[in-house]
Image (cartoon, rainbow, N blue to C red):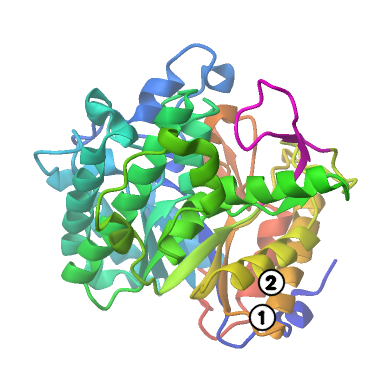
Amino acid sequence: MTDPKAFAARFPGDFLFGVATAAFQIEGATKTDGRRPSIWDAFANMPGRVLNRDNGDVACDHYNRLEDDLDLIREMGVEAYRFSIAWPRIIPEGTGRINEKGLDFYDRLVDGCKARGIKTFATLYHWDLPLTLMGDGGWTARSTAYAFQRYAKVVMARLGDRLDAVATFNEPWCSVWLSHLYGEHAPGERNMEAALAAMHTTNLAHGLAVEAIRHVTPNVPVGLVLNAHSVIPGSDSDEDKAAAERAFDFHNGAFFGPVFKGEYPASLIEALGDRMPKVEEGDLAVISQKLDWWGLNYYTPMRVLDDASESAEYPATRPAPFVGKTVTDIGWEVYSPAMKSLVEDLYRRYELPDCYVSENGAAYNMTPAGGEIDDQPRLDYYVDHLSVVADLAADGYPMKGYFAWSLMDNFEWAWGYSMRFGLVHVDYETQERTVKKSGKWYRELASQFPGGNHKPG
């Protein structure tokens, strides 16, 4: 096993180590203290949408076990906790009345982190859109962007003075393409026009939220978390190389372009023509306000081949075979070199600020044996990918921190509770938490850094 103390020497002395979660995946208590349904509550209750008809009603019961879970984070020795705030707890209908009890919960969360010496990285949107907003079209409706701006103002007015950083969105790729084009996530649409409308509304909402955050709390670093795709052609043919470039523009450029360049990719506009949503005057200036940091969520590469069939929808690609011999239990290829080439490519294409790896991890479903969970493959995954981050920092890229996904096993969206990403095992019947082998190693690594929490208890 890689010695964590020796491994720590590869990182800058001020490097930040953290753990990450998301509200819907861990909180439960979906009908408690004024919270109203989100699109994921509705989606999980539709037959065939989530494996085993699992839902978020209880999840990890974090809402009722907050203090114990904050103690657990402290015991992990990390410097920071990345979490998301549930819009349906704060403004339950998306617009209208503010729910003080929802704000009270996040007050306790943030204050609890501060009392334990843990930095707070909050995400305003991790996919739990208030269900009522679907009546107006959800993310396909421009009005949702302005509702989100108000929500951002409310959150920052209450919590902003105690936050160390804030992100507007987590993985807009998922809430746009995966949710409106591929139908795998809530609300489960499969329509290009709806997806394109959601793309622009989401980008606009990001920009409007940046304005709101900076108005209310000008000193809080603002960022955006993107699950950038390392798009690799499946062969050296010109057709597959062109397909990979199209895929890059579609999967990455649709978000990086407007945010960091103030424009949508020309190839996207040319290919989709009048199917593209209306971009009003001033929209791109709002979207492209400079950020203080950005978050990279990376798990696996995307390998593509050209799809020349007449029925192929843009970007007209199909999956290419894996090259890496290892796959995780969720079926994702393990190939850490793609993470390095992705970061290098993104910094070549865009003027990007400081980077935090805001999610990285692997699904392995080992169960307790003799009170221990030996998840060596997950530990190996962390070593391989953290090595890439260390190499990037050594090469001069502004890699400032790393958040392991995830603190604990949780509701893994369409996979329900069947896939486990946690450093900590959760027994969903008893809610008992058990630190895995990978979690013990990560704790030892994080504890080597001056900013980390060195007082587990």
The numbered mark at residue 349 is none
Mark 2 element type: helix
Local packing at callout 1 (Cα closer than 10 Å; few below 14, some 14-19, many 20+) is some
- Picture coordinates of residue 446 (x, y %)? 61, 73
Q: How many marks?
A: 2
User: Magenta part mainly helix, strand or loop?
Assistant: loop
Local packing at callout 2 (Cα closer than 10 Å; few below 14, some 14-19, many 20+) is many
- At x 45%, y 66%, the residue is 260
**Residue 306 in magenta stretch:** yes
Q: Quickly name the residue at label 2.
A: 389
- At x 72%, y 38%, the residue is 365
Q: Tell me which corner region of the image, top left, top right, bottom left or bottom right, holds residue 395.
A: bottom right
Q: Is residue 330 left or right of residue 214?
A: right
Q: Quickly name the residue at label 1.
A: 393
Q: Is residue 355 left or right of residue 159?
A: right
Q: Nearer the viewer, residue 345 or 379?
A: 345
Q: Nearer the viewer, residue 215 or 199?
A: 199
**Residue 243 in magenta stretch:** no
Identity of the amino acid at label 1?
A: Ala
* Residue 191 visible, this angle: yes
Labels 1 and 2 touching (C-beta < 8 A): yes
The residues colored magenta run 299-320
Identity of the amino acid at label 2?
A: Val
- At x 73%, y 56%, the residue is 437
